[in-house]
Image (spheres, rainbow, N blue to C red):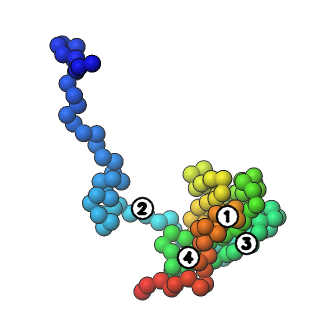
Amino acid sequence: FGAASGPAAKPAATKPAPASAAKRAFAAGPDAAPKRPRKPKVAPDRLEMLVAAARTSLEDDKAEDILVLDVTGRSDVTDRLIIATGQVERQLQAMAVHVEEALEKAGMSLRRNQIQASPDWVLIDAGDLVIHLFRPEARATYALERMWGPESPAPER
């Protein structure tokens, strides 16, 4: 019913909970946000070896419409994108596991947080190589080829 009174009653908290660093940085504006240092780039021949290993793995798993995009200079986070399609969630998960194994054989081990998955889309962040595995509907919805492909707008200089 009413608020308790007397010695057993506790005063209401007067201090707000501290905001997270990300919220404070966002509130301060985009220029104030701390920037994570980027990992050193892999050598171009090593990158091509990783791309080839991932592509071979996807081909072995019957991925459809495999597309490798060179986004060097257009993206601050990666140099190559691989986009591929799988028909069902189970195929996407198997492709992700096999790509991870292929990259490990090529000398790149991924941490668990570098693979993000949903039923329609798996994202594998291998630094200078980012792999997107989609179900057909999700691939059409997100249309990364239009954003990053050869016909996409050139970066502003």
Q: Residue at x 23, y 19 (%)?
A: 2
Q: Which residue is mark 3?
A: 66
Res 10 quadrant in image: top left
What is the quadrant of the N terminus in the image?
A: top left
Which of disc 2 and disc 4 is earlier in sequence? 2
Q: Secondary structure at mark 1?
A: helix
Give percent across and percent down for residue 103. Answer: 70, 61
Structural distance between the alpha carbons of marks 4 and 3: 16 Å
Marks 1 and 3 close (CB-CB < 8 Å): no
Q: Which residue is mark 4?
A: 147
Structural distance between the alpha carbons of marks 4 and 2: 24 Å
Give percent across and percent down for residue 25. Answer: 31, 57
Q: Which residue is mark 2?
A: 36
Question: In the current view of this chain or complex, which residue is farthest to the top?
Answer: 7
Q: Which residue is mark 1?
A: 137
Structural distance between the alpha carbons of marks 1 and 3: 15 Å
Res 15 quadrant in image: top left
Q: How many marks?
A: 4
Q: Secondary structure at mark 4?
A: helix
Q: Residue at x 70, y 61 (%)?
A: 135
